[in-house]
Structures are given as structure tokens and as C-alpha cells.
Amino acid sequence: MAFAITLHLLSAVIWVGGMFFAYMALRPVAAELLEPPLRLTLWRQVFARFFVWVTIAVVLLLGTGLWMIFAVYGGMGNTRPHIHVMLLLGVIMMAIYGHLYFAPYGRLCRAVDAENWPEAGKQLNSIRKLVAVNLSLGLLVVAVAAAGRFL
């Protein structure tokens, strides 16, 4: 259990912390300092590296979470309500990430590779909105995880 919870928490920190850094620190500075070709190329490369880690985190979060639910607690019927909330929000976040990765991120990559800066900017804006939603959900999951067992 200790190994599973540690992997679970580290995966959440990597994913949610990475989104927080990208959205709250990197995005405003890149928008202020870099012209669109350089800014969009930067984001393409940043996402290429970050999404490897997010994919690993998603697999570990789902795997360790389900293992703890079923192997440790004996199923959803034996867990407290905050576990249900975390699982629901986590699955929603994973679905948003899947959409983000396969739709706007793929289009961003193709647009940057073709130097179609207006289209790349449009796709980056779509990604920004999805990351804002996922960051909000991720922070909510962290709050539920931290406080849920005390409610």
C-alpha cells in the first residue's frame, strides 16, 4: 500500500504541478516575451516533453488508484465518498487529457511544422482552455484527497 500511494501521489504532483507551472508561470512570460513563431515552437517542444510525463502519470494514477480500491479496500462499496469523487474527477481529467493530446495538440504540431502560425495559435488557445479546466479539476482533486477523509 505504501508503494502504491507514493506512486499515486507523485504522479498527481507531476501532472497537476506541471499544469500549474505551465499555466501560471510559463504561459504569461512566453506570451509577453516571444513572437508567435518562437512562442508556438516553444510550446510544441514543451508539450512534447511534458506529455510523456503526463501519460506516465495517468497510467500510474489509474493503475494505483484502482489497485488500492479493489485490492486494499475490496471495491468501491467499501470506500468513503471522497474516493468516489476523486475517481470521477480523475477519469474526467484523463478524458480531457486524451482529447487534448489527440485533437488540438496533434493539430498544433502539424500547424507548427507547416509554419501555419494563425492555425497553431488557434490550437494553442484550445489547449490553454482545456488545461485551465484540468488544472481546476486537479486542484479540486488535491483538496478532496487532503480533506476528504476528515469530512
Image (cartoon, grey):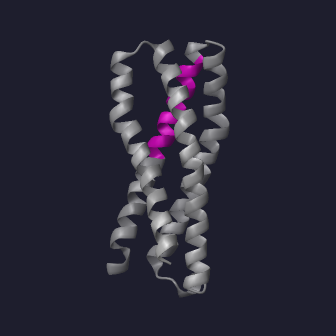
Front residue of 50/103: it is 50
Which residue does the image show at 39% across and 59% down from the upper left? 140
Side of 120 relative to 150 (left or right): right
Question: Measured along the vertical axis of the image, is residue 65 above or below residue 97?
Answer: below
Q: Main secondary structure of the magenta part?
A: helix
From the top left corner, tell me how far across and down residue 149 is, in percent: 37, 79
Q: Is residue 67 magenta?
A: no
Q: Is residue 107 above or below residue 35?
A: below
Magenta stretch: includes residue 132: yes
Q: Can residue 30 be seen in the rendering of this structure?
A: yes
* Residue at image point 50% right, 13% down: 37
Q: Quadrant of residue 112?
A: top right
Residue 7 vs residue 134, the one in the foreground = 7
Residue closer to the observer: 111 or 119: 111
| Residue 108 pos. (x, y %) | 61, 26
Residue at left offset 52%, top offset 71% = 4
Considering depth in this image, is 92 or 27 the residue closer to the camera?
27
Relative to residue 51, is residue 145 depicted above or below? Answer: below
**Number of marks present in the image shown:** 0
Observer able to see residue 151: no
- Span of residues in magenta: 119-133
Q: Position of residue 102 (x, y in %)?
A: 67, 39
The quarter of the rendered structure image containing the C terminus is bottom left
- Asked if 131 appears above or below 80 in the picture, the reply is above
Taking the image as shown, residue 128 lies to the left or right of residue 62, namely left
